[in-house]
Amino acid sequence: MGVAALALSAPAVQAAPAGPEEDARQLEIQARQLAENHQAYRQAAELYRKAAKLYGPSLEAAAAHAQAGKMAFYDRDNRATDDMKRAGDMAAAFGHVALAAESYLDGAWLAQREGLLQTAVDLATRADRLTDSPLLAEADRDALKRRIAERAEDMTGQEAVVRR
């Protein structure tokens, strides 16, 4: 029997089961496709939330929560603020200071829009505290401080100024 015949008669090697991380990645791909077509933002947000759950506590889950928050905002879903807070908390827990601060600031903006002023102040304060982190690149620090200053100006009219 020739080599080609052996190769054809050998049983196919079965691929290992995908596992939760690969399942999460597939959900994120589906969510991105929905979002890219500017449709079904609610479904996309749910897929990102499911992906975050499959990832478990990790930076990947933090990023998935942040994406869920963005999709929820586009869908006018009031869970967007909670998604951003989860993203910030998880990113902070894993040392990704820039993602944590950005997520908290996005959450603060969303909370302000919803009239949740105390939540907005809390999230903006968390972001502000992170700007002192030695893990933050100088360019990121400067950009965050500008965003925080802008947010504080926006909130001044609502008597919710973030003070250091």
Image: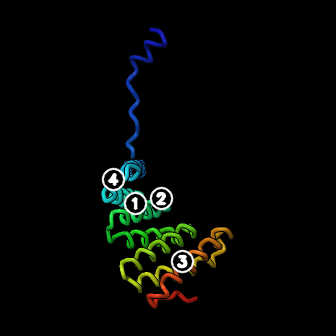
The alpha-carbon separation of the residues under discs 3 and 4 comes to 31 Å
Mark 4: which amino acid? Gln
Q: Nearest the camera: 117 or 136?
A: 117
Query: Crowding near pointer 3: few (<14 within 10 Å), some, many (20+)?
Result: many
User: Which type of secondary structure does the marked residue at label 2 adopt?
Assistant: helix
The x and y percentages for residue 78 are: 32, 71
Residue under label 3, please give it.
127
Name the quadrant of the C terminus: bottom right
Q: Nearest the camera: 140 or 1?
A: 140
Residue under label 1, please give it.
52
Mark 2 touching mark 3, by CB under 8 A? Answer: no
Image vertical order of residue 29 relative to residue 114, above or below: above
Mark 2 touching mark 1, by CB under 8 A? Answer: yes
Residue under label 4, please give it.
39
| Pair 2/3: label in front | 3
Query: Crowding near pointer 2: few (<14 within 10 Å), some, many (20+)?
Result: many
User: Which type of secondary structure does the marked residue at label 4 adopt?
Assistant: loop
Mark 3 touching mark 4, by CB under 8 A? Answer: no
User: Which type of secondary structure does the marked residue at label 3 adopt?
Assistant: helix
Mark 2: which amino acid? Glu
The alpha-carbon separation of the residues under discs 2 and 3 comes to 20 Å
The x and y percentages for residue 82 are: 38, 72
Write the residue at 57% across / 68% down. 98
Q: Earlier in the sequence, mark 1 or mark 4?
A: 4
Image vertical order of residue 123 relative to residue 159, above or below: above
Determine whether, in the image, residue 105 is placed left or right of residue 82.
right
Mark 3: which amino acid? Ala
The alpha-carbon separation of the residues under discs 1 and 4 comes to 21 Å
Residue under label 2, please give it.
60
